[in-house]
Image (cartoon, rainbow, N blue to C red):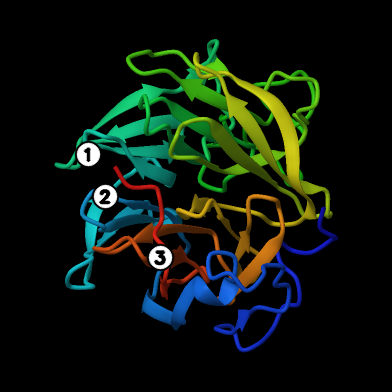
């Protein structure tokens, strides 16, 4: 397990430095962090309020959110241009494309999960668990094997919530509609063709009084990774086995004592890319921090581009950035 750090070690400046000081791999290129990256961090565009939720489509284009402005933008993989896709998103946060080309978005204005169609229209997939308002869906992963949807649901009070909203409260939140006491943080599963969520973090080892945040799974649909956002060094990245019915089992801690962990992605070598702190931190399947990509701050990341070798990063808060990789990502239908 790793010691206390903000989802990273040995923070460096300038912000675009790539920190290889925690390299734990050998000389084999597949395990050598230096072989993962090619070049340096580039700023694609800035001038946003808070970028989040990058989702890659079948062609390598990326859709991302500017949550304070309630917008979704589209980055074109061929031209590099950024255009507005949708204004009025339900305050979309984490997003991912499904196999039909629809954009699944965690829209926390009213605690909903949206299916956004290519023409910008949407369908609300879910807005409650057993009749009670969700905390605020935060991030999403879709199992590529069966199309089942997993979401994280932490309670982060928003200033745009109405005063009558039962989730409205000061920081640090101590109330949730999903728990008698505490934050009621859970992971939920929506099976294909179903309309009701299943709570899948019911095991006694799961801590409900925290903020589950980033989520990603393996392309074979067998393993799910979830991190929880914290500020006091108690954060974790945990792994679960995915059962045939979509429920989870065999919870185990991959990384412990981390802070401010956010969105995640995977590459074809099984490495986990975790945004948060100074940028993106890369962990190998054993939980070793093998690489840190400093951008000056980060909220989420996804592999994109026509060859699926561009790591597209949201953050620092006002911009989107990228770095060319020598390895492909896995999150693309």
Task: Kindly identify the residue that appears in the image at 56 percent across and 77 percent down.
Answer: 34
141 in relation to 300, above or below: above
- Report how far apart the C-alphas of labels 1 and 3 lie in the structure: 19 Å
- Report how far apart the C-alphas of labels 3 and 2 lie in the structure: 13 Å
Q: Residue furthest bottom?
A: 14
Circles 3 and 2: CB distance less than 8 Å?
Answer: no
Choose between 9 and 290: the one closer to the eye. Answer: 290
* Position of residue 306 measured from the top left corner of the image (x, y, whole percent): 24, 63
Choose between 44 and 30: the one closer to the eye. Answer: 30
- In the image, which disc is placed on residue 101? 1
| Circle 3 residue | 312
26 in relation to 93, above or below: below
First in sequence: mark 1 vs mark 2? 2
In the image, taking residue 236 as reference, residue 20 lies left or right, namely left
Task: Kindly identify the residue that appears in the image at 77 percent across and 55 percent down.
Answer: 258
Q: Quadrant of residue 298?
A: bottom right
* Position of residue 214 measured from the top left corner of the image (x, y, whole percent): 57, 46
Choose between 89 and 299: the one closer to the eye. Answer: 299
Residue 166 in view in this figure = no
* Position of residue 281 measured from the top left corner of the image (x, y, whole percent): 62, 64
84 in relation to 120, above or below: below
């Amino acid at each position: 397990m790793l010691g206390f750090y903000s989802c990273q070690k040995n923070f460096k400046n300038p912000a675009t430095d790539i920190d290889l000081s925690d390299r734990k791999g050998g000389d084999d290129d597949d395990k050598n962090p230096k072989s993962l990256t090619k070049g340096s961090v580039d700023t694609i565009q800035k001038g946003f309020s808070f970028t989040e939720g990058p989702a890659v489509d079948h062609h390598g284009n990326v859709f991302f959110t500017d949550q304070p402005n309630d917008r979704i933008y589209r980055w074109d993989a061929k031209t590099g241009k950024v255009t507005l896709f949708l204004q009025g998103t339900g305050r979309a946060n984490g997003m991912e494309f499904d196999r039909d080309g629809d954009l699944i978005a965690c829209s926390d204005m009213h605690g909903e999960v949206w299916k956004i169609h290519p023409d910008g229209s949407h369908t609300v997939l879910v807005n409650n668990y057993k009749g009670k308002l969700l905390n605020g869906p935060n991030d999403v992963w879709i199992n590529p094997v069966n199309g089942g949807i997993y979401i994280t649901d932490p309670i982060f009070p928003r200033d745009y919530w109405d005063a009558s909203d039962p989730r409205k409260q000061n920081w640090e939140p101590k109330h949730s509609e999903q728990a008698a006491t505490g934050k009621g943080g859970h992971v939920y599963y929506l099976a294909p063709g179903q309309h009701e969520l299943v709570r899948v973090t019911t095991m006694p080892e799961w801590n409900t009084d925290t903020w589950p945040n980033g989520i990603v799974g393996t392309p074979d649909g067998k393993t799910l990774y979830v991190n929880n956002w914290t500020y006091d060094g108690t954060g974790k990245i945990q792994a679960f086995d995915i059962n045939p019915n979509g429920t989870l089992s065999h919870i185990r801690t991959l990384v412990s004592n981390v802070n401010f962990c956010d969105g995640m992605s995977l590459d074809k070598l099984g490495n986990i890319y975790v945004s948060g702190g100074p940028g993106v931190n890369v962990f190998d399947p054993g939980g070793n921090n093998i690489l840190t990509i400093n951008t000056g701050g980060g909220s989420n990341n996804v592999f994109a581009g026509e060859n699926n070798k561009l790591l597209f990063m949201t953050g620092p808060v006002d911009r989107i950035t990228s770095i060319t990789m020598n390895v492909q990502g896995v999150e693309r239908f």
